[in-house]
Image: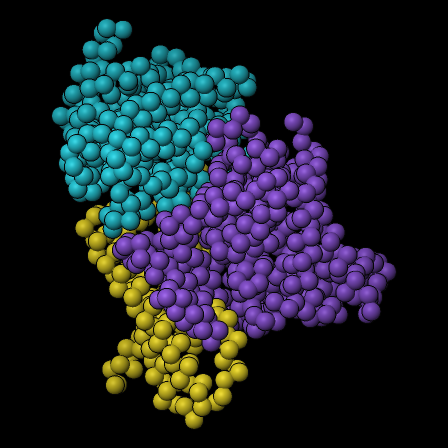
Amino acid sequence: MHSLLALRTRILQLEDILLVGFLILAMVLACLQIVLRNFFGTGIIWGDSFLRIAVLWIGMLGAMYASRDDHHISIDIGMRFLPQHIKPFVQSVVFIFTAAICITVSWYSLQLVLLELEDNQYGFAKVPVWLCEAIIPFAFLIIAIRYFIAALLTLHNRP
Amino acid sequence: AALFPDGSSWMQKMRAGADEIKEKTQGRVKFKFYPGGVMGDDKAVIRKMKIGQLQGGALTGGSLIQAYSENQVYSLVLKYQSQKEIEYVRGFVDPLIMQGLEKGGYVSFGLMGSGFSYIMSTKSPVANVSELRKLKTWIPANDESALEAVKAFEVKPITLPLGDVLAGLQTGLINTVAISPIGAIVLQWHTQIKFITELPILYSFGTLVLNKKDFNKISSADQKIIRTVLSNITKAADKQNIKDNEAALATLRNQGIKFIQPNVTELNEWKKYAAESEKRMLSAGIISNKIIGIVNGHIKTFRKNK
Amino acid sequence: MILILTIVALLVLAYFGAPLFSLILAVAMLGFYYQDISLMVIPIELYRITNTPLLLALPLFTFAGYLLSESNTSQRLVRVSRAMLGWFPTELSVVTVVVCAFFTAFTGATGITIVALGALLYPALTQSGYPKDYSLGLVTTSGSMGLLLPPSLPLILYVIIVQQMNLGQSITIEQVFLAGILPTLLMFIMLFAWGLWVTRAKPIALIPFNFAELRHSLREAIWEIPLPFFVLGGIYSGIFAISEAAAVTALYVLVVEVFIYKEIGLKKLVKVIQDSMTMVGGILLILGVALALTNYLIDAEVPTKLFEWIKQHIDSKFTFLILLNLFLLVLGMILDIFSAIVIMVPLIVPVAMGYGIHPVHLGIIFLANMQLGYLTPPVGMNLFIASYRFKKPITEIYRSTIPLMLLLLVSVLIITYWPSLSLVFISN
Ligand code: NA
Ligand code: NA
């Protein structure tokens, strides 16, 4: 249990660093390209490719963030008309459904990453495509775990 | 899948061809088309062929490097002097490339040339290499052969998303591009261009391919029908592209764009740099001495008989 | 039977707040499963996010927008706007519409406008005395008209697609941009008139122009006012590309708010990044899975078949246009704008030209309708984005947006049935 909590802290830290890092990096790199072009007549050749992949990473990391407290876009009209004692059950069904969808996507994304591993295509500079794609299975796995835990907690903490 | 939009003459021919195949194979072989790049770029299409969503596609030579890198022999910088010359060489070398692609897992029905790219600039004419180096030259991100070309001439390129190029030419953010005449007109870049250098920088092509695994599931009689119909379409498209590029060049001339002819010294300088690039492609193992030898032989014969 | 049960189950899950992305994924996955296509197609489509034009603008403009909304920019903005234009009726709502439309023209996506500018303009409007519902609706809809203005990328894409078709009639980007002017103006006037009507009981006080107050307010906002000029100047002088404007803006705003106004500390900066990127993640995830769903619909040839079906039920230009409006509205609700253009334009243009509709006019109709689709309840994407950004229940967004959406619907109908409005500046 203790090591699990430690792992959780580590993952949260990693998310923080990656998300803040990628955004700042994307912003600085795009501005650096402007400076290089205007003052040195040159540019970073893989800059544009990197920025595109950075958007994917920022998006997936942001999506992981949003799943920390079920802060994803949803319609959410029905829940407030439910009686208190039924709410946790319905809520956990919704969470389990989301977790199931995410774990499925994570699995198939992993298959794709493994498939790309056979090729040595580059996403940008000398960074292979599979590594650029790897955020997809990882993010969906984390999101699935978070929704699964949320389901358990909802049932556990019901009034 | 195809990157051509629906309604283009090519897609009309493809649909007619698909009907013909369906009829001749009594409905055993049917085609579904996804034109206009709706299945994604070439890389996405190749991924989808791998997982079996798509069985084929119209792909650029550059995207098939993984299957058979020597197809890049046509994209060597300044290797060919004219459309006639490349046509002559292609007569002999196309079959080799198709064999290579087939070994790499793709059944090709022939190559379709998209024509030569030319240096087009908005600010000042480009007759020699040093004039090019002074300009702000755009190349597409992730385009290996374009990158090779600018490396060859020691130009510092500017990469921008495709969507930024037209506005970039307008504002002066960039002032030079290399593109085929058709491409320049379709993308509206020709509205900004003032000078074109009459040097066929590099030749690019596309090809219609089917996944070999899927193709082998079809009976050999049906395979034959498909081969005949699709290679006829490919040939027709190849011819049409030549005509379209000529017409596009004429349009560009007529709208008052200046065509720049490098003199002999300048020409030799261009070629000197281009030769370096060929050596690099060789040492990187992208193309082999063998195929270069074959191509050089045909070029020699062609130039002798001219 | 299984199909119906599944649909009902998904609707129930949606009703009880299942995340939208998981519902879209469920539909796409079921579809691919029945088409016998490997579900690896889902990550392939998600990865196509990396090929979407101008998408870097989403995280960077969102970040910049959050920074502005976390500092006191909206108060300064209101003060300048009042001082400069306070003599003009409902001046701030006019400013809102113009700013949003302009912003959309450059980013090519109305969703980004809502996220980036919404939280700045919404409090500005409510602080100045506009009703809450009206303000919410206005910031949700204002970006829409920008799609018809240069240098809107969807409009350029439309021209490129039409040019590659064998039509015997060519159109140019200039023509389509010219054609967008009056329709945009029409929508603008409609929204302006509505602003006057809504505030008729409690009109926003007009204040006479006061030079001293203007000078004070400008001095207060001396670092923020130059931003748009700085960015536009940079683009038009060729210093940076449109796709780079977001990065320049973000860096500029970061420096101004953190180091000059010092209204955001470094610790808060990290928080702002996390919050804004959570929003970006939520939206990008939806965009990504919507690509997957779109791909399923394309694979199953749903839009094509639907259009074929519509074609059979046309007997006049009038019914064609009515059905076209409906069809495009639905399309705007389910497809992203770039896919919709690429798939549908080649199908629709020849049919439309058969009814004597000019391809330039059709382009305006197409985009105006698509845009409206994003605002149409229950599933218009921009409504969800607004609900997400302003942390309001989706029902409240529906309520506040519907009047404005109806107004835009009327304008779209006028644009559709009055071709001269679009074509007056075009010679052939
Ligand atoms: Na926008
Ligand atoms: Na949208």
Q: Position of residue B236 (x, y in %)?
A: 33, 22
Judge from the rendering whether residue C149 lies leftward or rightward of residue A111; answer left or right.
right
Residue C143: percent from left, percent from top? 61, 55
Q: Position of residue B124 (x, y in %)?
A: 50, 24
Q: Residue at x 45, y 73 (%)?
A: C12
- Colour assigned to chain C in the rendering is purple
Viewer-nearest residue: C173 or C275: C173
Residue at 53 percent across and 25 percent down: it is C168
Q: Residue C324, how many percent across, how many down?
A: 57, 46
Task: Report if residue B4 is visible in the image.
Answer: yes
* Res C284 → quadrant: bottom left
Q: Which residue is drawn at 35% across and 58% down?
A: C31
Q: Can you say whether C343 is above or below C13 in the image?
A: above
Chain letter of the yellow region: A
The correct choice, above or below, for C322 with respect to B272 in the image is below
Residue drawn at (20%, 42%) of the image: B214
Residue at the far right in the pictured view: C208
Q: Which of A20 and A121 is in front in this view?
A: A121
* Drawn side of residue B115 relative to residue A1, left or right: right
Q: Colour scheme used in the picture?
A: by chain
Q: Which of the 4 image quarters holds residue A11?
A: bottom left
Q: Is residue C409 left or right of residue C265?
A: right
- Give whichever of B236, A123 is nearer the camera: B236
Q: Which chain did the image draw in cyan? A: B
In the orientation shown, which residue stands out farthest toward the left? B290
Question: Please, is residue A38 above or below residue C334 in the view?
Answer: above
From this view, report whether residue C194 is shown above or below residue B131: below
